[in-house]
């Protein structure tokens, strides 16, 4: 049974850390936003640190995360950005404190490493959603879904049908995140059991042939055959070769999962898109895909 961290309330202390790539500018917009929600923001040392492309050395980034994992006064930890680097420090952090004092871990993209690791090893619900670096460009809708998720306000999604959708009704615990990161977790101590889960995937900046390879890798590893359902989010800024691959990312995904019976929805508003709506990783959801559209609703 998944553990849901206590929902936030005004006056709570929250932290911003940088477990991956270094920041190009201060996080003033995010600090102001969180302050407007009544939260007290504490900035980790990695917010201003730099080591090559990273926000400090692997040890510094691990220590920053450890500091706030162990600090019971901190109720949520926001990853300031993704990029690359979380996998380099993940095994240097002791997350055991989350068992007795669960708290929200928020982010997406490279932060899929944290979502996957925490879900597999600690069964604590985490939040896939907008990060501080994205706040200036984020839609108001996506920011509001983030606030609602953190403060425990009921929220569900109803999105229009996509031509490639496969209809059906199901329920299951949500898992997933960035497709390339999920594949990089295979066989590791951070690899989630996908069976009977609703899998969410998204990606950015990949070549179409690599989307094909990543999906085939998941399938050949047995990760796709026993899903409860599949949610396909944004696949943005994709690239092609001089000789075109011949399929869109969505067509690639559809072709690989067509042999399975579970419901599939495409173009869900989450991922590397401005309308990156919040999803609770580790939370049970009901998932209905009809000819009219898709409904995703958390189970209480």
Image: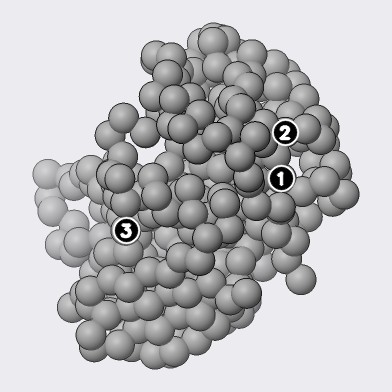
Q: Position of residue 182 (x, y in %)?
A: 53, 53
Of the residues under marks 3 and 2, which one precedes in the sequence? 2
- Residue nearer the viewer, 56 or 1: 1
Disc 3 packing (10 Å; few <14; some 14–19; many ≥20):
many
Placement of 199 over or under 108, stated as above or below: below
- C-alpha distance separating marks 3 and 1: 25 Å
In terms of secondary structure, where does tag 3 sit?
Answer: loop
Q: Are marks 1 and 2 in contact (CB under 8 Å)?
A: yes
The residue carrying mark 1 is 103
Disc 2 packing (10 Å; few <14; some 14–19; many ≥20):
many
Of the residues under marks 3 and 1, which one precedes in the sequence? 1
**In this view, the mark in front (3 or 2):** 2
The residue carrying mark 3 is 269
Q: Residue at the spot x=24%, y=69% of the render?
A: 251
User: In the image, is 196 to the left or to the right of 230?
Assistant: right
Q: Residue at the spot x=45%, y=36% of the render?
A: 131
Placement of 179 over or under 298, stated as above or below: above
- C-alpha distance separating marks 3 and 2: 29 Å
Q: Would residue 211 be visible to someone looking at this image?
A: no
**In this view, the mark in front (3 or 1):** 1
Placement of 268 over or under 133, stated as above or below: below
Q: Are marks 3 and 1 in contact (CB under 8 Å)?
A: no
Q: Would residue 26 be visible to someone looking at this image?
A: yes
Of the residues under marks 1 and 2, which one precedes in the sequence? 2
In terms of secondary structure, where does tag 2 sit?
Answer: strand
- Residue nearer the viewer, 126 or 247: 126
**Which dot marks residue 74?**
2
């Amino acid at each position: 049974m998944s553990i849901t961290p206590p929902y936030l309330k005004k006056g709570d202390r929250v932290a911003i850390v940088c477990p991956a790539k270094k920041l190009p500018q201060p996080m003033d917009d995010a600090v102001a936003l969180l302050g407007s929600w009544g939260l007290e923001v504490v900035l980790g040392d990695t917010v201003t640190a730099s080591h090559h492309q990273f926000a400090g050395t692997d040890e510094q980034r691990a220590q920053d995360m450890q500091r706030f994992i162990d600090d019971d006064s901190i109720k949520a930890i926001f990853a300031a950005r993704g990029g690359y680097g979380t996998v380099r420090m993940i095994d240097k952090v002791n997350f055991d404190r989350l068992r007795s004092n669960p708290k929200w871990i928020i982010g997406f993209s490279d932060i899929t490493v944290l979502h996957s690791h925490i879900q597999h090893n600690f069964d604590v619900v985490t939040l896939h959603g907008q990060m501080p670096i994205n706040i200036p460009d984020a839609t108001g809708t996506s920011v509001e879904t983030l606030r609602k998720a953190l403060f425990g306000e009921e929220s569900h999604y109803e999105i229009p049908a996509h031509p490639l959708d496969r209809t059906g009704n199901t329920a299951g615990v949500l898992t997933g995140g960035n497709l390339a990161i999920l594949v990089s977790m295979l066989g590791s101590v951070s690899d989630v059991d996908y069976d009977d889960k609703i899998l969410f995937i998204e990606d950015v900046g990949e070549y179409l042939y690599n989307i094909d390879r990543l999906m085939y890798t998941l399938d050949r590893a047995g990760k796709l055959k026993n899903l409860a359902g599949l949610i396909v989010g944004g696949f943005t800024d994709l690239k092609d070769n001089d000789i075109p691959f011949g399929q869109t990312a969505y067509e690639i995904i559809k072709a690989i999962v067509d042999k399975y019976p579970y419901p599939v929805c495409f173009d869900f508003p989450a991922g590397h898109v401005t309308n990156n709506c919040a999803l609770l990783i580790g939370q049970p959801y009901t998932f209905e895909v009809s000819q009219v559209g898709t409904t995703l609703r958390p189970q209480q």
